[in-house]
Structure formats: C-alpha cells, structure tokens
Image (cartoon, rainbow, N blue to C red):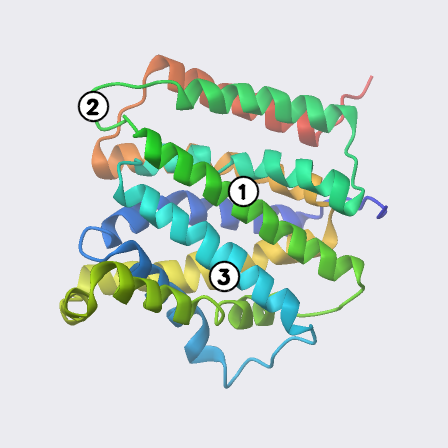
Amino acid sequence: MTAATRMSVGDYLCVAGVVAIWGLNFVIMKMGLKSLSPMLLGGLRFAVASLPFLLFVKRPALPWRYLASAGLLQGLGQFGLLFTALKFGMTAGMASVVMQMQAMFTILLARPLLNERGSLRQWLGLLVAAVGLAAIASAHGDGPGQMTLIGFVLTLAAAFMWAGANMVVRFAWRARLSYDPLAFVVWSSLVPIVPFFALAFLTEGEDATWRMLGAVGIREGLAVLYLGLLATLLAYSLWTRLLQRHDAGRVSPYSLLVPVVGLWAGAFAFDERLSGVQWLGVGTIMCGLLINQFRLRG
C-alpha cells in the first residue's frame, strides 16, 4: 500500500487543465472525423504528439514493456475504439460521459492488481456516480443526443483500455521507476503510430487513405494539432504526473468532471440538447465526486 498524500494547489490546477482540454476533446475528434477515418486520425494524432519531439526529449529510464503497454492500451486501444465509436453514431457529449467509466474500471482493476483497496467513502462515491452515468446513458431520443448501441459498447471498451493504461503508470511507480511524465507520453505515443496507419490502409484501402491525407485542410490540421499537442502531450503529461503522486482511486474520479464540459461543448457545437434525465445524471455525478474526494467533518 502507498501512503496517501494531500492534493496540492498545483495538483488541483493540473486537474482543472486536464478537465477543460479533455472536455473539448470530443468535439474536436468529431470534427476531425468528418473527413478522416478513425485509424488515420489516430495515426496523425500520435505522430504529432511524438515524432517532432523525439530528438529533444530523452527516452525515460523505463523498460520498453511499460512504454509499449501504455502506447498500445491508451493509444491504439482507447482511441482506436473511441474514434470508431464516434464514427458510428456516438455523440460527442455522450462519449465524454461514457468514457468516465474508466474511473470505475480503474478502481476495480487497482484492487486485485495493485492492492489499492479504496475506502468505503470512495466506493460509495463511485456507486453514486455510476447511477448518474447510467441515467445519462439511458436517455435516448430522436434528436442529436441519441447514441447508437455499437457506439456505446465501443466507447465502454475504450474506457476499459484507459483504465488499463492507468494501471501501467501505477505499476511503474510501484517499481520505483522515476521518469518524466512528458517523456513518458512522447515515447509511448511512438508505439501506436505504425499500427494506426497500417489499420488505416487495411480498412480504408490505399487509394482512399492517400486521398484523405492529400485533402487535409486547415480544419483537419487544427484538429490534429489540438489532439496531438494539447489532448495528448499536455493533458496526459499532467494526468501521468497526478497518477505518479497519488493513488489511482483518488485521481481517476476527477475525470468525472469532463462530461460537464463535454456535454456543454457538444450542445454548443452540434446542438446536442440535454434532456431532464441527462441533467439529473450530471448532478448525480457531481454528488458522487464530492462524496469520493472529500471527507465529512463533524
């Protein structure tokens, strides 16, 4: 077991930055997927996050198994599945919600794999948040807020991959391997590039893939830069730093704030309107987060 450490002001600022970047992230993905295939967008995202920095950022002092595991789980697994889900009917706002199941999966995996049992308060908070997520996910309609079944399943699988990547970071910490989070993100982002491009050529065909690359314009370029530099390089560096300093069960629930930004961004960009049940779900998630993170003082 690791000793619990108090969240500092700097840690909370990291959380705020990650929440804002990842909340807007889903709208940017949806925009990029209008003209790029899921696998091609994934390959471009991680190429931008890795290749320009390899000459300037020294490889972290980690065995390759950690970098390869994180790259495949968080890169190819999480975003390959998520991009495919968004392409097949998952809305941006709903994706930001369902992805937060990673908090549940992280704590469930942390117990047998890391012996991070979590307190009764944490489990209660996550149970309340799960009810909120279920309420939002169950709200279907004929408008843009409706999600497809395949989109939901693929996004849920992506959330599980994210939780697996969280375990890799915690395993590295448990092994007392000291490394720079930025270097970790840069070098682990190198791993999924070739698999993403290989899958793009395999699924879309060579001619179609080259046409999409040749048609990349300002909108697609800005989307790739946002996803590669902000959502991957910056946000995951901050997230890794938090996971290095604190138990997975304490850090992962803060991602439950991402849907607050994501649902607003989806409504603004794509007119994805929220129903009363969805708003109730958001409020329930917030209550679960408060229960999970703050002790009641009497």
| For discs 1 and 3, the disc positioned in front in the rendered view | 1
Picture coordinates of residue 139 (x, y %)? Answer: 35, 18
In front of the other: 64 or 293: 64
The residue that label 3 is drawn on is 234
Q: Identify the residue position indicated by label 2 in the image.
A: 143
Residue 231 left/right relative to 186: left
Q: CA distance from mark 2 to mark 1?
A: 28 Å
- Horizontal arrangement in the rendering, residue 270 relative to residue 79 (left or right): left
How far apart are the alpha carbons under marks 2 and 3?
Answer: 34 Å
Please, is residue 81 above or below residue 263 in the view? below
Q: Going 67% across and 48% down the picture, which residue do you hit?
A: 9
Q: Tell me if I can see residue 259 in this picture.
A: no
Q: Give 163 or 15, whichever is nearer the viewer.
A: 163
Q: Position of residue 143 (x, y in %)?
A: 20, 23
Q: Which residue is disc 1 drawn over?
A: 160
Mark 1: secondary structure: helix
Q: Position of residue 126 (x, y in %)?
A: 63, 26
Pointer 1 local density, CA inside 10 Å: few below 14, some 14–19, many at least 20: many
Q: Quadrant of residue 87?
A: top left
Numbered disc in front, either 2 or 1: 1
Residue at disc 2, secondary structure: loop
Give the Cα distance between marks 1 and 3. Answer: 22 Å
Q: Secondary structure at mark 3?
A: helix
Q: Residue at the location (35% across, 45% down)?
A: 26
